[in-house]
Each structure stands twice: as structure tokens, then as C-alpha cells.
């Protein structure tokens, strides 16, 4: 998968590295700001109330 | 075969990295929301104080600021605005006051829940509180100083710790107690850690 992406990236290696870094950052940002906040309520490692 | 193995390997490594990132998000990322909400709540408290709304509140709206919590033992800058309510949304903003328990300084049990590992983890270090350490509640009408009396670990269904006299549901209270409640052990929801205190001093706010 990563090899396939690398081959698809245009330009010479320095450009490719830069594009790859931008891609990684973009995926990270989507996870951090969109996916993780949606998943977070399902994780109950920090329950602080009692079962009343 | 090699192609498949590579695909499995890459997927596993990716999944591992995403999981690590998710843990980082839980521990540190969630705190940024709490910090921004704390700024709003503390401003709300300051405004109410400046507006000098008279008297003590009998009922506070869910999600609004109740008082300021300070624990000198946990640092001189340890300061959290306590929010009314212990629903998921309220606890994301900071330590929450159980709505059907006493208000600050009142006879009965003033019960606060707070996160221990996520959402800025306000109650992360309350296990370090020892007998006679001070818990200060800056309410609108007065500053209440509570003195820590003991700690306890209970199962999540032992609701009698929330009683007006903590742990003794049948007894009528004659003193003002405080109870801090968080999860235990750290990173687990198996038990609850409790820190009990009793009112030591009341300093009415100067007009």
C-alpha cells in the first residue's frame, strides 16, 4: 500500500517526501479532530460517577 | 504470498500507529477542550461575583459554574471551576457537582466528580491528599475551607458514599462534608476513589 502510494506521488524524491509528509499530517488531523472525538465516548476508562 | 504478507504487515503497523495516536488523544488531546471551557466558566464566575448577585443560590442550572475549587497541596496554580452536573458533557468541562447533593458550605455532603486521566484530568492526583490537607471552595458568598479526613476505594455501585453523611444513609447530617470522587485504579473504571473532608472554616466574602 505504501509502496503503491509512493509510486503514485509525482516529482523527484524531495518533492515526494514533502507530499508524503503533507498526506500523513492530513490523515493525522482528520483522525485527531474528527474521528477520535466521535470514538472517545465509547471508551470508558475514565468513569467517575456511581451507578445510581 | 509476499504481497499478501506485506499488506498484512503494513495494515498492522498502521493500526498500531493509529491506536497510539488515539491514546495520545485521550490523554492530552481531550484536555484542550476542558481548558477552553474552564476559561469560560471562570469568566462566568468572575462576572457573577462582579455583578454581586445577592444571596446564596438554591438551584444552579446544569452546565453553569458553581464555584472555584483550589487544592494548595496539588500546586499553587491548582484551580478549577466546578460545573453543575455530572453528565458526560458537564464532566468534559471540569469537576462536576452532583446536583442532588449539598451546595458548598451547606450541612450535608458536597459531592464532586472529576476525570482522572482524560479531559485535563483534574482529579489525577487526589490520591496524594492526606489527613488535614485543605480543599478550598471559593463560592459566591464565602470561601469554604474543608479539611481532608480520609480516603476510600469503593465499587461503582456503593452509592451510600453520596449520602448527606458519607457512607451512612440513615443518619441526619449536622456537619458540612465534601467528597471528591474519581475512577480507580488510574486508567480503569473498575472502582472509585473517594476523598472525604469536613468543613473547617467559613470566610464570608467582603462586600
Image: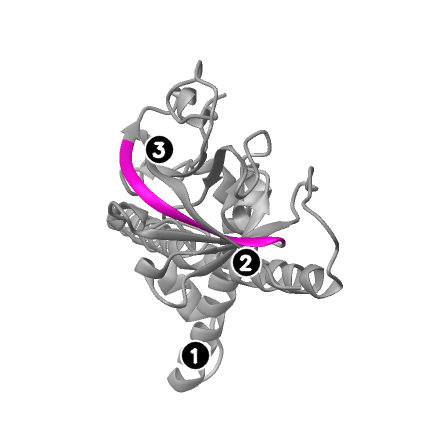
Q: Position of residue B50 (x, y in %)?
A: 71, 66
Question: For the point 53% across and 48% down, which residue is it?
Answer: B92
Q: Which mark is residue A16?
A: 1
| Dominant secondary-structure state across the stretch colored magenta | strand
Q: Position of residue B159 (x, y in %)?
A: 43, 21
Q: Position of residue B102 (x, y in %)?
A: 55, 34
Q: CA distance from mark 2 to mark 1?
A: 35 Å
Would residue A39 be seen by someone viewing this image from the given angle? no
Callout 3 and callout 1 share a chain: no
Q: Which mark is residue B189?
A: 3
Of callouts 3 and 2, the N-terminal one = 2
The chosen color scheme is one colour
Callout 2 and callout 1 share a chain: no
Callout 3 and callout 2 share a chain: yes
Query: With B17 as the anchor, is B52 left or right in this view?
Result: right
Q: Position of residue B174 (x, y in %)?
A: 47, 28
Q: CA distance from mark 3 to mark 2?
A: 22 Å
Q: Using the rendered view, name the quadrant where residue B166 is placed.
A: top left
- B63 vs B74: above or below: above
Disc 2: which residue:
B33
Amino acid at each position: 500500500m505504501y509502496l503503491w502510494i509512493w509510486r503514485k506521488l509525482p516529482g523527484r524524491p524531495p518533492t515526494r517526501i514533502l507530499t508524503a509528509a503533507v498526506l500523513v499530517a492530513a490523515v493525522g488531523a482528520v483522525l485527531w479532530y474528527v474521528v477520535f472525538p466521535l470514538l472517545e465516548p465509547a471508551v470508558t476508562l475514565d468513569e467517575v460517577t456511581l451507578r445510581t | 504470498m509476499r504481497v499478501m504478507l506485506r499488506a498484512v504487515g503494513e495494515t498492522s503497523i498502521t493500526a498500531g500507529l493509529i491506536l497510539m495516536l488515539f491514546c495520545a488523544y485521550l490523554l492530552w488531546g481531550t484536555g484542550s477542550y476542558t481548558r477552553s471551557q474552564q476559561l469560560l466558566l471562570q469568566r462566568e464566575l468572575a462576572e457573577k461575583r462582579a455583578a454581586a448577585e445577592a444571596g446564596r443560590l438554591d438551584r444552579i442550572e446544569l452546565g453553569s459554574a458553581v464555584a472555584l475549587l483550589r487544592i494548595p497541596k496539588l500546586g499553587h496554580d491548582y484551580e478549577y471551576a466546578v460545573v453543575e452536573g455530572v453528565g458526560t458533557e458537564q464532566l468534559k468541562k471540569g469537576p462536576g457537582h452532583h446536583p442532588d447533593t449539598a451546595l458548598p458550605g451547606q450541612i450535608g455532603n458536597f459531592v464532586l466528580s472529576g476525570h482522572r486521566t482524560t479531559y485535563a484530568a483534574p482529579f489525577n492526583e487526589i490520591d496524594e491528599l492526606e489527613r488535614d490537607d485543605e480543599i478550598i471552595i471559593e463560592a459566591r458568598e464565602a470561601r469554604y475551607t474543608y479539611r481532608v479526613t480520609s480516603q476510600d476505594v469503593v465499587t461503582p455501585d456503593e452509592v451510600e458514599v453520596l449520602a448527606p453523611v458519607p457512607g451512612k444513609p440513615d443518619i441526619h447530617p449536622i456537619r458540612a462534608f465534601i467528597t471528591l470522587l474519581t475512577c480507580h485504579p488510574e486508567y480503569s473504571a473498575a472502582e472509585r476513589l473517594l476523598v472525604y473532608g469536613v468543613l473547617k472554616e467559613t470566610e464570608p466574602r467582603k462586600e
